[in-house]
Image (tube, grey):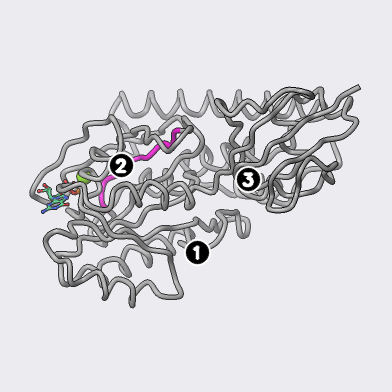
Amino acid sequence: MPANLTPEFLAARERFNKAKTDEERLDALQEMLATIPKHKGTEKMQADIKRRIAKLREKMEQRRRSGKGGGPSFHVEREGAAQVALVGPPNSGKSSLLSALTNASPDVAPYPMSTFRPCPGMMEYEDIQIQLVDLPPITPEYTEGWVYGLVRSADAVLLCLDLSDEKCFERADEVIELLSTRHILLVDGPSRQADWRTVEKRTLVVGLKEDLAPERGKELSQWAAGRFPHATASPATGQGLEALRRAIFRTAGVVRVYTKKPGHPPDMTQPYTLREGATVLDVVEHIHKEFVDRLKYVRLWGSGRFAGQHAPLDHVVQDGDILEIHIA
Ligand SMILES: Nc1nc2c(ncn2[C@@H]2O[C@H](COP(=O)(O)OP(=O)(O)OP(=O)(O)O)[C@@H](O)[C@H]2O)c(=O)[nH]1
Ligand SMILES: [Mg+2]
């Protein structure tokens, strides 16, 4: 067994071993695949995890088709730089927001519980795309387990509130509480596996339908102060949507890095996208695994202080950094 398995991977494997349902098993396997160190020594394990995921998905799909046990279960393939889950009480405007920010056309209805399956859409932000996933509401009455499964595997969360509902903050607290009983904690910090069963998800609170209750924006600031970053918007009027795109990008925890060839200007057309906290070495590995063994040095422009100097391999890259990779 390779010696360099990370604590995150070990926690996910522990979760897999203790899982009682296929949904939990699938969730843990996906986390294992996401956190396993990617190098030659783990290739067999990676293949094994992928095989198990495929088998499990097939089994779950068959069960769904045959209508037996557990009800429907859904999985949304991750696309783009990050996957962000739209979470909130019924009728808060989640589907309207997806429709306003992406090319998707989910069902929007003037009554609660109109969404009953996930709907992904791609949101453009400058030179990248972020996947938003609209979900059924989270309510104390009933929310199917797979909804929590999707929130758990997303990179970040948008907690959507209806500002025209005077009880919107109570309802938001209820959603936060329901998620926490499922060991999903909404936080103002990087998304991470906190222990073997608890995940923390970076969260942006979005006050929607601002056009109906512009005065409630202040209450939102007070309610969210010290807990979450927040924004307001109206999918119906388009108000606030551009600022919201930027806020969603920040919440998604993505950094873009660009590369240049020695003696050439940087290629600013196609960034590589990595998770926040990624190091220079992670970028090199992301671009080409083989480069790691052949790496001589990396010159960096950006990070607030580099202008082409050699960068330490453990230097954490920032959004917009430019790397010139020198290999043997
Ligand atoms: N005035 C106004 N109405 C809005 C806005 N956004 C959504 N609505 C209305 O609010 C109602 C609910 O919107 P949805 O987008 O279906 O809400 P949802 O959160 O997806 O609802 P569920 O899927 O049932 O949880 C619809 O009648 C929308 O037209 C907005 O910005 N302003
Ligand atoms: Mg909806």
**Mark 2 residue's CB less than 8 Å from ligand 2:** yes
Magenta stretch encompasses residue 130: yes
Q: Nearer the viewer, residue 228 or 51?
A: 228
Q: Quadrant of the C terminus?
A: top right
Looking at the rendered structure, which numbered label has been put on residue 17?
3
Q: Is residue 167 visible?
A: yes
Corner quadrant of residue 116: top left
Residue type beneath disc 2: Asp
Q: CA distance from mark 3 to mark 2?
A: 30 Å
Q: Is residue 1 visible?
A: no
Corner quadrant of residue 285: top right
Percent position of residue 300, x then y? 76, 40
* Residue at image coords 85%, 36%: 2
* Residue at image coords 36%, 36%: 73
The residue tagged with tag 1: helix, strand or loop? loop
Q: Nearer the viewer, residue 128 or 43?
A: 128
The residue tagged with tag 2: helix, strand or loop? strand
Magenta span main SS: strand
Magenta residues (range): 129-137
Residue under pointer 1: 188
Looking at the rendered structure, which numbered label has been put on residue 134?
2
